[in-house]
Image (cartoon, rainbow, N blue to C red):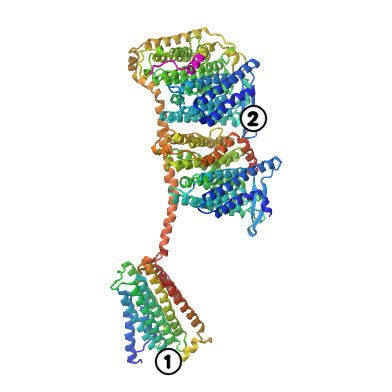
Amino acid sequence: MESLGNIIMYVIIALSIIVFSVMAVTTKKILRAATYLLFVLLATAGIYFQLDYQFLGTTQIAVYAGGVVVLFVFAILLTHKPGHNAEPITSHKKAQGILAAVACVVLCGVALFSFGRFCFKTLGGGTDVPMGKLGMSMLSTGSDGYLLPFEALSVLLLACIIAGVVIARRR
Amino acid sequence: MEIFSNILIYFVIVPLLTLGGLALTSNKGIKAIRAVAVAGASALMALAIWLVVIFLRERGAGNNAEMILTGSWMWYEPLNVKLALGVDGVSGVMILLSAFIVFAGVFASWKMNPLPKQFFLWFFLLSTGVFGFFISIDLFTMFMFYEVALIPMYLLIGVWGSGNKNYSAMKLTLMLMGGSAFLMLGIIGIYFHSSADGQFTMNILEIAKNNAIPESWQMWLFPLTFIGFGVLGAMFPFHTWSPDGHASAPTAVSMLHAGVLMKLGGYGCFRIAIYLMPAAAQSIGWIFLLLTGISIVYGAFSACVQTDLKYINAYSSVSHCGMVLFAILMFNHTAMTGAVLQMLSHGLMTALFFALIGMIYGRTHTRDIREMGGLMHIMPYLGVGYVIAGLASLGLPGLSGFAAEMTIFFGSFQHPDMFHRVLTVAATCSIVITAVYILRVVAKLLFGVVQDEHHRTLTDATWEERLSTATLILAVVAIGCFPNFFSDIIRASFDPIVAALGGMRYVSAQ
Amino acid sequence: MITNTVLVLVLPFVMFLFLGLAGVKMPRKTAGVIGVVGMLITTVLAYWVAIDYFMHHPGHEQISAEVDWLNFTPKLVARMGVLIDPISAMMLVVISTVSLMVHLYSLGYMCDHHGHAEKGFQRYYSFLALFTFSMLGLVVATNIFQMFIFFEMVGLSSYLLIGFYYSLPAANHANKKAFIVTRLADLFFLLGIMILTFSTGTFDFKELVGLGDMAASQRAAGTMDGLTFLGIPAVGWALVFIFIGGAGKSAMYPLHIWLPDAMEGPTPVSALIHAATMVVAGVFLIARMFPLYVLAPMAMNVVAVVGAFTAFYAAAVACVQSDIKRALAFSTISQIAFMMTSLAVSADGGQLVGGHEAGLGYMASMFHLFTHAMFKALLFLCAGAIIHAVHSNENDKMHGLHKFMPITSIAFLIGCLAIAGIPPFAGFFSKDEILVACYERGLGWGLWMSMVAGMTAFYMFRIYYLIFFWKKHEVHTEHEPSDQPWTMTLPLIILASISCVAGFLPFGKFVTYNGEVLETHMNWTVAGSSVGIALVGIALATWLYFKENPKPERMKNAMSGLWEAAYRRFYMDELYQFITHKIIFQGICKPIAWFDRIFIDGFFNKLADLTGNASFAIRRVQGGNAQSYVFVYLLGALLLAAVTGVVILMI
Amino acid sequence: MELTLLMYLIPSLIMFGCGIYGFLTRKNMIAMLISLELMLNAVDINFALFNRFLYPGKLEGMMFSLFAIAIAAAETAVAIAIIINVYRIAKNVDINQINKLKF
């Protein structure tokens, strides 16, 4: 039996994810879309916390909610005049989008219900991954080690920084 | 290197050297560009004449080999592709023809503008392809040079052309490329049946000697190769690139194209299609004979109602080139000799025509015969040149067309089969239609009253134009007055082909 | 002799090249004088050759020399050479004489009234030389192919000379017409040669016809035995086609239409080419091939019928023409038809007719060719002098010129008497022999040709009276018409003298079909009746036209339909116009060109369009629109997932 | 009431669907990028979820999410740089106007 607090928390998180996701892709004002995205990302962080992934949740807030959304806001401010509304979406496109989205959701749903015997598993008594273990595994090369992806990611990040600078540089 | 001791290779090297020389000149130095181009063209002319001298000397000395000056250097071992060179009488005179036209073409494009350097670069690349085609006896090498000759045409028309040039350049290139796709298939087919023992070869002489292509395959390969070359030879119904292409092409390119490139078609038809697939040629040649017969009459009739000078000549070329293929398909010495004479004659006189049209167009800025008239008063030299070209075209004795056409007609009429003779009679009728459209143009363009008062201020030919046309006129007259010299060189070259065809169709029925 | 003959050929050719290339650089008169001198030397040489031949070769054997020109097959070789036999020797004389006269005459004619030579004078002389060369080459041809070549060459020179005033639309039109019509005829000539050589395998006259010995031609015709096409023997086809070739040059009906128009050329040219020499090339051709024709009765009958009809037709048309040159042109057609008929009536059913005078028609034809050349050239040159004086071709601008141009008038009268066949002028003798030959073939032929002879006398004197008599001349121009300078008068006098005496030449001694002397006897019945008919014609002309009177007008009105039809040459030109413009041009060429553009070209364009459209259709898939990529990708992925899922479920 | 895996998966699935919808319909490139982030985010959640519910002792899912977040940040930075550059050239960020690679 789950604690009521957990359930209430879950309902808030789930609802905000659903509502803000829908709003993020339907709103006409792009800055609002970014804001709704921020809420979705925060709600996601909430899920991580509920799952006892504190570090992941923190990263989600720091990198996504903090970094990426700020980037979005900057980009929007650079490329849009205030009060600018997006042009209405053509019905043809809308139908296309809805078709694809619904098809995807339905398919995944069907798949979940037909194969997902695991779906009704509840959360066992797992605990948070301690920071020390995380740090060790990130920098080790053993069976639980992630040094190689870590390094690859570092290189990728460097490349992205350089690429970002080069591309956005004013010629 | 041993290869450099063969004179034939220089027909490729000289244009390439000229290309190099042109590349070194500066864009602005028109004098240097002209000097290099003239030097290259003159060297080619000298080489070609020297080649004919060598040829005559060899034959005089009793060298009766099918090809002389042969040589062969391995190029790509796995496919047994060689750079195989050799000439017989036919390719010898074709080389001579090409040299003349390149020479005249250089002078005809003396004032080429814009980008003269690039123009000559492509022009000489085209020449490289043409000469390379005539000197090689290896299918692969031939095909390669054939393509080398086709591609520059696109740029030469597309960049330096006039009128609806993009359309024309595209149409010409695509149709000829379509033809060469057929050809490619044919060549591959021939290659894989070139020998009975699995030692495949690309060398024409060896393939002919092996005679290993099964008749069932010949039935496929003959049409493929014949149509492939027939497109270039403007065979009905694959001729429509010719009017548009010629109309848009710059002068020298029209000259080279009608003068030489279309001859590649005729040459290829007998050297590859008929020589290598004699059995199929015998049994289904009549289909193509019918098509070429249509070409002759159809082209002539179409020319009668055209109003653009270049269209008239393009259709006339369809008619005359149709005659070349027609005669080749008659499978006897006389007609085939006539076909080559006709190639020579048509090459020279059409080049002359196009040169003169270019010169007239350069002055009047129109090619519509309805807008011109009385030019004989204004530019007598060009006028006389045009009349001579016209008379050569309608087959006046003493000019090249007559000797060629007569050889074709008499040769074709020797055919023992009534069908062929009746077709010959139909083809012969074209000489009247030719007279109609030639005289119509001459009357409208040169005689009569001046249509446009501005034309009165125009000038006659300049020295380089005179040189260009005089070269061609001299050649036309030379063939017309001494046809035996040329036909003797050519005739013996058909011995192996006629022998391959069964050798029974030499003289008349009796 | 061969050397001289070759020189006779080479000299005019050199003149042609010299005057044509260097003429522009020299004064006009100089070019003319050089041309005349060159022609004089040629004439002397030609006479020398002819005299030499007839003096030293009484057997009239053929003398020839030739070089190979173009080998078709080892056996069938086109050669170039010279062949001297009676008819070619005679033709050498005729051509060089008339040509010299015309060269001389043109010195005066081709000048304006101040004596300044016209523009293009050099070109004119150069072309005249080219024509002379071609015509001489034609008559000395050793083989039928060489003959064909020179047929084309004379056609060319005729084209160039008719179109001498090339800026005039009429001349421009006429030369085109002349060339194309004769070219059409030459096509048949060529086909004829092709059929002939297909089985005989030779061009050579020696092997085809020999000299009158029927053996050679029998051999040649024998090789064609059994060859037929559409039920007609090949030899018949060949000879009829060759005749059509000759008919084109000789303006036989219905290929005569170019000749009246050819009068747009300068008058001396008409005299030389379209009256005296080139137009008899067809007759010469038939004469050359005579032994073969004898063996092909069908072909011979075609020649006879066409000749007889043309003679009448042209005479009828000549009776009403108002343009004197055209009237003379139709007269020429009629007279050439006389020669043709004469040749043709001398054989029937594969045999020569006329017993001991066998081959009389042949001889008469050649004789008439000779005399006709002289007096018709004379008539044309007179007409030229008149035209030069009054600047018009129409006879209603002339009238009463006798007073002003007495020499011309007398010369013209001599010409008229000669052509009408009044003794002792040249035409009497030759025409009389033709009529004899016709009567020998059959009474119908004789009567028909006699009637035409009467018409000849009528229309010639009609022209004569209309020019020189009738009403008094009113001076329209600023200067009086008068006799022309000596360069123009001298040829008239010379030709008139020849016309007076040429009839007394013992022609049968020189020119016969087999080289043997043919003794001719005056057939007094025929001679008397023909003179009588001629006199009747002259009398009728005198009655109608000697003085101005309303009779001609009344007659014209009485049968206006017939008169109109004859004046319009029985609508032959309109018929040709219809055939060429409406049928060939509008009905064949235009549709073919249209078909080419729309269907053939359209097919390839459609092919290109199709490829293009297909590419465009496919291109939309790769339109650079990221969202549609994603959409398609997603659907694909979902589909794949669904399929996988279903498959897994099934398993 | 128990919080099952399914209950977490459903919001994530809806988020993913929204991402698809947004990506396919929005013309604004930044909005498209936002939709992309939504989709990425949904996937991240799933990684974490499956790890936690099905293999509690393991680290892979969580690590994958961690790296994915980092990569998403980098990718967003580059994408935005590109968008800004396109904006400079084309003066708008409409995806339909940018279908030519050459300007």
Q: Chain of mark 1?
A: A
Query: SS for tag 1?
Result: loop
Q: Quadrant of the N terminus of chain B?
A: bottom right
Query: SS for tag 2?
Result: strand
Q: CA distance from mark 2 to mark 1?
A: 119 Å
CB-based contact (under 8 Å), mark 2 and mark 1? no
Q: Amino acid at mark 1?
A: Thr
Given residues A62 and C318, the one toward you in this image is: A62
For the view shown, which residue lies furthest in the right direction?
A: B61
Sort mark 1 into few (<14), some (14-19) or many (20+) by Cα contacts within 10 Å.
few
Q: Is residue B242 visible?
A: yes
Q: Chain of mark 2?
A: C
Given residues B267 and D14, the one toward you in this image is: B267
Residue ID for mark 1: A127
Q: Residue at horizontal 63%, vertical 17%?
A: C52
Residue ID for mark 2: C67
Q: Position of residue C466 (x, y in %)?
A: 39, 15
For the record, the magenta segment spans C479-495
Q: Is residue B329 visible?
A: no
Q: Position of residue B436 (x, y in %)?
A: 46, 34
Q: Is residue C494 magenta?
A: yes
Q: Amino acid at mark 2?
A: Val
User: Which quarter of the picture shows residue B64?
Assistant: top right
Compared across the picture, whether A85 is left or right of B161 comes to left
**D49 w.r.t. B226: above or below:** below
Q: Position of residue C280 (x, y in %)?
A: 52, 22
Q: Quadrant of the C terminus of chain B?
A: top right
Sort mark 2 into few (<14), some (14-19) or many (20+) by Cα contacts within 10 Å.
few
Given residues B10 and C466, the one toward you in this image is: B10
**B116 w.r.t. C38: above or below:** below
